[in-house]
Image (cartoon, rainbow, N blue to C red):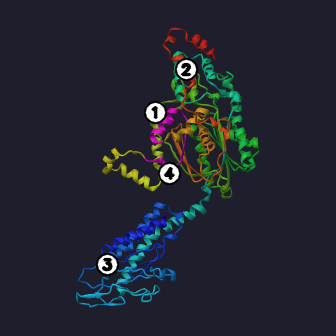
Amino acid sequence: MVHRLGSFVYELFSVWGSRYGYKGVQFVLDEPLICNSYMLPCNLSTTPTSLLSSSSIMVLTLIAAALPVVRCFSLRQPESTSRCSVFLSHQQSSSTRSSGEDLQRLSILSSQGQSSYLPSRGTVHHGEHKEHVSDEFSTLDRFPSSSPPQLPGTDLKKILMELLIAATIVSAPFILFSVYYLLSKYVHSGGRCYLLSYQCYKPPDEQKMSTANSLQIALRNSNLVLEDYRFLQKEMVSSGIGDETYCPRNIMEGREASPSLQESLKEMDDIVFDTLDRLFAASGISPSQVDILVTTASLFAPCPSISCRIVNRYKMKEGIKSYSLSGMGCSSSLVAVDLVRQQFKLQPNALAVVVSAETIGANFYRGRDRSMMLQNVTYRTGGASILLTNSPALKHSAMLELTALVRTHPSSDESYECAIEMEDEQGYRGFRVLLPKVARVARQCLVENFKVLLPSVLPLWEIIRFAVQLSTPFRLLRRRSRRKRINMKTGIDHFCLQPNTRALIDGFKTSLELEEDDLEPSRMTLHRFGFTSCSSLWYVLGYMEAKKRLGRGERVLMVSMGAGYMCITCVWKVVRDDLGDPNVWRDCIHEYPQQASVNDFAFKFGWIQEDCVNFIRYDDYVRAQYSRY
């Protein structure tokens, strides 16, 4: 396509030159350009286009085409001065010569009044205004391509110097990009990051948290009053969570008021060891081959650490580099991926495992602060293990390749305090989320993040369109334009968004101008598994793979936000065509996407919002209604 575009540009300049009296001007992309009897090598068709983006090659093609033509036009003299004709000919094959395309001619004007080369027929009288030049030109043998006609030495030196400068300007970007390409490919090859496999955790069916179980758990909290129940019911209805999510064993069995360390370790072990066993079995990688291990758990930090428990369980090699991240919030999984990517730059041909999980049972909130009660509504049990590598030998078996990752971490007090773990006035520990502040901070943080990420993933023409639209002269046009935001779909094919709540997903839809089909994986993940904290993105990716949405060459955008307040985005490129493992969606993918229906919490517990409940003892009424289920 770039070759055809270059040919079109040259023909366009040829037509433009002929309108100003320069007949026969034609430049061929595949052959050297000759201007003023000097050969300028501009064979762009043989340049490796992989070194440049298509937009860069288009700009360089225009420059290469414009410089010789501008130089030719700059030599035009008044009518009183003498003229000379310089011919450009190229040896064609016998078949081409027979077709009438055996001669290309270029007519330009010389700035000197001395004698010059003339056509085969015709005369030029110096000092007179009369001249006679035949319309016919000499044959191919008159001026062979091996010995082009020469101009006087003074003018030739000037022209050669100008064309040498032009050639340097044109070729400089190619040289720079070639050096960058070679350095990035051979010197910094360790910075590449490939995703070989990942496994998500699916708890057993006895840990399913149905609608009835939700009410039963809420009734066990003696600190709540009627207004608190109404608030919980309203949040459950608007959260977008279904009635088949999973909850820890200690909460299902009624021990959430006094969780023990052993129960927390058991909950973490079930997630970690189950996903790692399936990860090693699916990939064929032995635990002893792992070079880097990173675990993430925001609200649980035992000693020895979780990474130490994994190394001890699988008897990994002594030289393994293990890290345990805590307190990083819901974005800790991508933080771990970023840490692995940095380690890959120092350790080539390495294998890394990232384990993301969270303990819900030890962090159940029993107070009445509504900003802290939200964690009981959306958070559910889940986890994931991811296998990464930078080895070129394993590239053919990789699923995704990490092409970009950007972290944004503002330092304001508002961003730090909008989501924080603390104790309420009654001494109950929980995680407070101030929704108005979170929405404002998240929006600002995402904008700053996209300022760095999008120029590296979106095409140049979309960035130019958006910049022009924001410029002052186009304000009136911008008001009438349908698209006032940048079009993310020009560089991104799939959107893997953090499924925190339905309100957050709707905010992504409005801000990024996405379609409902783009949000389907996040919505269905929230409905089926709830919000599993840092591992939720891998459930969304699993839905895309189970639906066979991912094709080779397509790019997936992951957006994750967490306490701090941090925003992390990354772009993965699909490198295989046979992605379709249903993973944890195996037994239910055929039921999705589900059509909009009446929420079970609204259908079964909508009575709690009725006014008649205000005039009776709410606890007896609630238990009477619960006995029906």
Relative to residue 426, is residue 78 drawn left or right? left
Q: Determine the image quadrant of residue 78.
A: bottom left
Q: Is 378 located above or below residue 11 in the figure?
A: above
Residue tagged by mark 3?
Answer: 75
> CA gap, disc 2 to disc 1?
24 Å
Amino acid on which the number 1 mark rests in the picture: Lys
Residue tagged by mark 4?
Answer: 491
Say which residue appears at 25% left-offset and 84% top-offset. Answer: 81
Residue tagged by mark 2?
Answer: 426
Q: Nearer the viewer, mark 4 or mark 2?
A: 4
Q: Nearer the viewer, mark 1 or mark 3?
A: 3
Expressed as whole percent of the image width and height from the top left, the position of residue 617 reads 55, 9
Q: Earlier in the sequence, mark 2 or mark 3?
A: 3
> CA gap, disc 1 to disc 4?
30 Å
Q: Residues within 10 Å of mark 2 (few under 14, many from 20)?
A: few
Q: Earlier in the sequence, mark 2 or mark 1?
A: 2
Q: Is 316 located above or below residue 42 in the figure?
A: above
- Stretch of the chain drawn in magenta: 486-514
